[in-house]
């Protein structure tokens, strides 16, 4: 599975979506349960869930008349690995800058 970084970062850029993700990672919840937790319409919560689903961070399954939203732990692991790679790149760049500055001071 390839991580669509644009969709993931877009999904995680919103505090409500981060909170929804946090809730459904702990235990799956219906969209109705989620909607009761926020001061917004059911439709607005559905839209937030859709953005998370498009980023492959959550999935929905039907249980009777309800849709249960669950967090996709493997997708979060992939995002975490991606962020670790970015962190390593920036640490290497910072180390190079530090070496250059030290060389300048010694010259």
Image: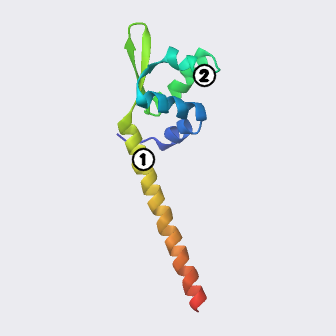
- Contact check, label 1 and label 2, Cβ < 8 Å: no
Query: In percent of the image, x 50 and y 74: which residue is there?
Result: 96
Query: In percent of the image, x 43 and y 15: which residue is there?
Result: 67
Query: In percent of the image, x 59 and y 35: which residue is there?
Result: 15
Answer above or below: position of 46 versus 105: above
Q: Which of the 4 image quadrants contains residue 76?
A: top left
Answer above or below: position of 73 versus 107: above
Q: Which of the 4 image quadrants contains residue 107?
A: bottom right
Quadrant showing the N terminus? top left
Q: Which of the labelled discs sits on residue 52, or is there none?
A: none
Label located before the other in sequence (1 or 2) = 2
Q: Position of residue 17 (x, y in %)?
A: 55, 31
Specify how the rendered protein is coloured. rainbow
Q: Which of the labelled discs sits on residue 80, or is there none?
A: 1
| Callout 2 crowding tier (Cα within 10 Å): few <14, some 14–19, many ≥20 | few
Query: In percent of the image, x 51 and y 38: which residue is there?
Result: 7
Farthest residue toward the bottom?
Answer: 107
| Callout 1 crowding tier (Cα within 10 Å): few <14, some 14–19, many ≥20 | few
**SS for dot 2:** loop
Q: Position of residue 45 (x, y in %)?
A: 57, 21
**Front residue (pair 98, 23):** 23
**Front residue (pair 73, 43):** 73
Answer above or below: position of 44 versus 85: above
Q: Which of the 4 image quadrants contains residue 69?
A: top left
**Disc 2 target residue:** 38
**SS for dot 1:** helix
**Front residue (pair 100, 15):** 15
Front: mark 1 or 2: 2
């Amino acid at each position: 599975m390839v991580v669509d970084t644009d969709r993931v970062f877009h999904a995680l850029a919103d505090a409500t979506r981060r909170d929804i993700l946090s809730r459904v990672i702990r235990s799956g919840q219906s969209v109705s349960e989620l909607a009761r937790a926020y001061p917004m319409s059911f439709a607005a919560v559905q839209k937030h869930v859709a953005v998370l689903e498009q980023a492959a961070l959550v999935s929905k399954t039907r249980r009777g008349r309800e849709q249960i939203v669950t967090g996709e732990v493997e997708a979060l692991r992939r995002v975490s690995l991606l962020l670790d790679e970015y962190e390593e790149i920036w640490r290497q760049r910072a180390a190079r800058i530090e070496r250059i500055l030290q060389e300048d001071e010694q010259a």
